Image (cartoon, rainbow, N blue to C red):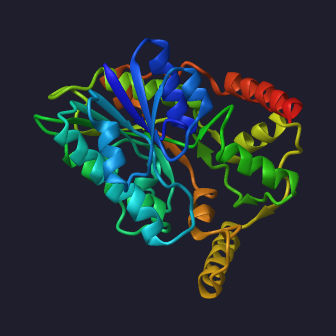
């Protein structure tokens, strides 16, 4: 089997590639950059972005299965910044799968596609898409997820996974942001209630993708469906943040701000950044304020039932692995 992983050099993409290579699959990566580690693993690399139809066609031609992991993430930017890669790029992937008779498509979505700004406590996949989004990322990911699920047919089997806040060694997004703000003393607890969150360790997220793919075929139990993926260990949000800080020998977060004040600060900063076209991104946005002051944990029964998902790496073990990696990384630098 020849398998394409879009974003194969990224955090999740590379973890999926590693599992596929280890079991002997022929793997091809499609990313904007070349990655020496993928070359070392013997992975064929084709470079381009999701809007480059010619390069994407070369990547898709001859493949049997596609993991579509690549996306524009983040909480700030224009609608077009997110629409082109996340929605139009996914359209291009689907069209390419149909053109080259690729049998299955596994799409990496996000729980944020159904986040309406309120607590998500033990929710399952029946929770509807909201009418309004506070950021372009969840809106465009929702549009793309719908396209993938609607594309499920007698010719192309599709499935969408919603891993929640992936973290672990080699993380280039969540963990670095926490550590950077922790070192600067810029972290503040938002709100007073003990919001529970269920994040997912990187190896568990990658394994879920491979398990879902192995059970996916036309008419299979998981075809045309979406699934929440997490560690099945809900913890108070700021306890999890503090445990990540502790892995880097940084002090815990003590200071706090009310949820209402954080939301107002986000609204003010967003307005200023848009009005004056400031570079970078605001330190707080309305979306982030809501994310950090609400619970996010999920009923994982569907993933367990339909493709045997079981998180092998516990949060405690993952944190120890993270500590070791951070220490090694510090020595190397």
Residue at 54% across / 31% down in the picture? 14
Q: Nearer the viewer, residue 72 or 32?
A: 32
| 278 sits to left or right of 149 | right
In the rendered view, does 319 fall on the left or right side of 108?
A: right
Asked whether residue 208 is in view, the answer is yes
Residue at screen point 83% across, 51% down: 182
Judge by depth and name the residue closer to the eye, 90 or 217: 90
Residue sitting farthest toward the bottom = 275
Taking 319 as reference, is 26 above or below it?
Answer: above
Q: Position of residue 267 (x, y in %)?
A: 61, 78
- Which residue is located at x 69 percent, y 31 percent? 169
The residue lying furthest to the top in this view is 23
122 in relation to 88, above or below: above
Q: Quadrant of the N terminus?
A: top left
Where residue 172 appears, as percent x and y from the top left, is 66, 43
Q: Quadrant of residue 333?
A: top right
Q: Position of residue 6 (x, y in %)?
A: 42, 40
| Number of numbered tags placed on the structure image | 0
The residue under the point 66% across, 39% down is: 171
Q: Camera-side residue: 77 or 234?
A: 77
Instruction: Say which quarter of the image contains residue 196.
Output: top right
Residue 142 visible in the displayed image: no
| Image coordinates for residue 238, horizontal then vertical, percent | 72, 47
């Amino acid at each position: 089997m020849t398998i394409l992983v879009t974003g194969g050099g990224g955090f999740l993409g590379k973890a999926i590639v590693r599992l596929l290579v280890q079991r002997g699959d022929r793997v091809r990566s499609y990313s904007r950059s070349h990655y020496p580690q993928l070359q070392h693993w013997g992975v064929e690399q084709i470079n381009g972005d999701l809007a480059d139809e010619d390069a994407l066609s070369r990547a898709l031609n001859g493949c049997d299965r596609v993991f579509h992991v690549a996306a524009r993430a983040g909480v700030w930017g224009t609608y077009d910044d997110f629409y082109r890669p996340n929605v139009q790029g996914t359209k291009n992937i689907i069209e390419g799968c149909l053109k080259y008779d690729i049998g299955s498509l596994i799409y990496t979505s996000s729980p944020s596609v159904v986040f309406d700004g309120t607590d998500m406590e033990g929710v399952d996949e029946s929770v509807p898409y909201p009418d309004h989004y506070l950021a372009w990322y969840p809106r465009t990911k929702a549009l793309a997820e719908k396209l993938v699920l609607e594309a499920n047919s007698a010719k192309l089997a599709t499935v969408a996974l919603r891993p929640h806040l992936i973290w672990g060694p080699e993380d280039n997004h969540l963990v670095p942001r926490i550590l950077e703000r922790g070192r600067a003393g810029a972290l503040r607890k938002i709100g007073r209630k003990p919001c529970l969150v269920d994040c997912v360790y990187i190896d568990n997220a990658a394994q879920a993708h491979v398990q879902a793919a192995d059970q996916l075929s036309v008419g299979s139990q998981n075809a045309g469906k979406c699934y929440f993926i997490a560690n099945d260990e809900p913890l108070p949000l700021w306890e999890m943040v503090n445990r990540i800080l502790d892995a880097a020998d940084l002090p815990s977060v003590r200071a706090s701000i009310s949820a209402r004040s954080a939301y107002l600060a986000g609204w003010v900063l967003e307005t200023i950044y848009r009005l004056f076209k400031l570079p970078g991104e605001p330190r707080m946005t309305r979306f982030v304020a809501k994310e950090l002051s609400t619970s996010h944990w999920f009923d994982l029964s569907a993933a367990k039932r339909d493709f045997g998902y079981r998180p092998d790496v516990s949060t405690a073990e993952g944190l120890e692995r993270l500590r070791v990696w951070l220490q090694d990384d510090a020595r190397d630098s």
